[in-house]
Image: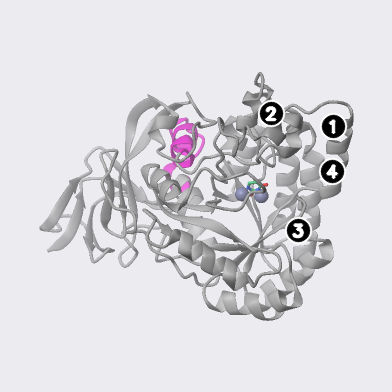
Amino acid sequence: MFDTIIRGGRVSTASDTFFCDVGITDGRIAALGADLGTAAEIIDASGKWVLPGGIDSHVHISQPSGEGIVMADDFESATRSAVIGGNTTVLPFCMQERDLPLREAVNAYHAKADGECYTDVSFHLIICDPTPAVLGQELPALVRDGYTSFKVFMTYDGLALTDRQMLEVMAVARETRALVMVHAENYDIIRYLTDQLEAGGHTAPRFHATSRPVIAEREATYRAISLAELSDVPLMVVHVSNREAMDEIRRARRRGLKIFGETCPQYLVLTENDLDGLNMEGAKYVCSPPPRDAASQKACWEGIEQEIFSVFSSDHCPFRYDDPQGKLAPKGRTSFRWVPNGIPGVGARLPILFSEGVMKGRIDINRFVALTATNHAKTYGLYPRKGTIAVGADADIAIWDPERRQKLTHAMLADGCDYTPYEGIEITGWPVTTLVRGKTMVRDGDLIGRKGHGTYLTRAISAFA
Ligand code: DUC
Ligand code: ZN
Ligand code: ZN
């Protein structure tokens, strides 16, 4: 007798596909097989695909975003959209605040998340001020407590680290076996071009893309890889947008380095032309690195197919459009420099890759599972509890209808934003029912679970560290 049996579905993991029933007890997968007997709840999955729930390892929630700017999502609305889009775990960032102990920032994020989440969550740490206390005491203690990944930035005022500071953070990562994630764009190239563009009166949102060319991303990617090689640490290059940066990762991997790459939906289905919209409409697509061109989209698909990219994340970084605290902030009208930087995507990520990738024959379902769940769990210390369908794993499961066809609209995503950059995309396949640790949170498209079911996950060391 199980709590729940998912019956008659086609189950896929990152390696296999098989027809079987899934027996769930106490939030975990207790059996895989035929004729499992009875359960308090039977979920009929005939004609459906039963996949590990998505893990989105790159999302920003309730992150301070500059004076007068407010993120569109708190933990409730972001994880609501996540679970409706077939996710069962998200990994947001906890951003260090200057002159405050890092632990205080961690505690503040816990206070924001506690009791609010529909999915499980776990925090990466953004390091923007690597003081001796942070490097010597705080980070080692936090890694011991299960915060096993750091993100560093190579651009942005107040965030960018110097090469020396990156080396210092990487030295701590090596010692503690934390995984380093890097935002790789050349700070001075962007600052220089931004000043030049503004001086020439080129201030519309579309010039955001002009100010952050591929060369800036490629150079920083190569430099970050070099620093990681010197430090002998694994490195995840996040939100890769183009062939040149990807080729740096490919070369490093060929040389046997543990360099990993992440790409995101915006680099597969948007281009810089989307920033061209009249008035301020282009602001809806302002994110960094910016969407590029059709050739870059093709390159990112190649990176997905050829396993240069091991994870596909949303980089959900939501700002409302028609809002003075969002994309239409008064300062943003004076220059692209001040347009809040980031786009929503936590709910749209999986349907876009399923439809554009699996349904269009670019990747198989096993690669989809690897890119959206299993590899995230392995990279960030959650495997095998999360990211697969196996006896003993958490029953984090998304049941997909591979035939449902619809146009994506913002209303379907239930986030705190007022738009989606993916409005109107034709989508085939949808995660109709989602279970988080055995509890049905979404049934036939309706949110039925309660917020607060999502719990905080203390993570182990990355499988690659
Ligand atoms: N980098 C991110 O990872 N997210 C949003 C904006 C940015 O620059
Ligand atoms: Zn970034
Ligand atoms: Zn991000």
Please give the residue where the numbered disc 2 appears in the rendered image: 272
Image coordinates of residue 38 in percent, x first then y, are 10, 57
Q: Determine whether the residue tagged by mark 1 lies in a helix, strand or loop.
A: helix
Image coordinates of residue 45 in percent, x first then y, are 23, 43
Q: CA distance from mark 4 to mark 2?
A: 19 Å
| Sequence-first tag of 4 and 2 | 4
Please give the residue where the numbered disc 3 appears in the rendered image: 225
Dot 2 alpha-carbon crowd within 10 angstroms: few under 14, some 14 to 19, many 20 or more: many
Please give the residue where the numbered disc 4 appears in the rendered image: 191
Q: CA distance from mark 2 to mark 1?
A: 19 Å
Please give the residue where the numbered disc 1 appears in the rendered image: 198
Image coordinates of residue 435 in percent, x first then y, are 30, 52
- Callout 1: CB less than 8 Å from ligand 1: no
Marks 1 and 4: CB-CB under 8 Å? no
Residue at x-position 58% and y-position 72% = 103
Q: Label 3 is placed on what type of residue? A: Ile
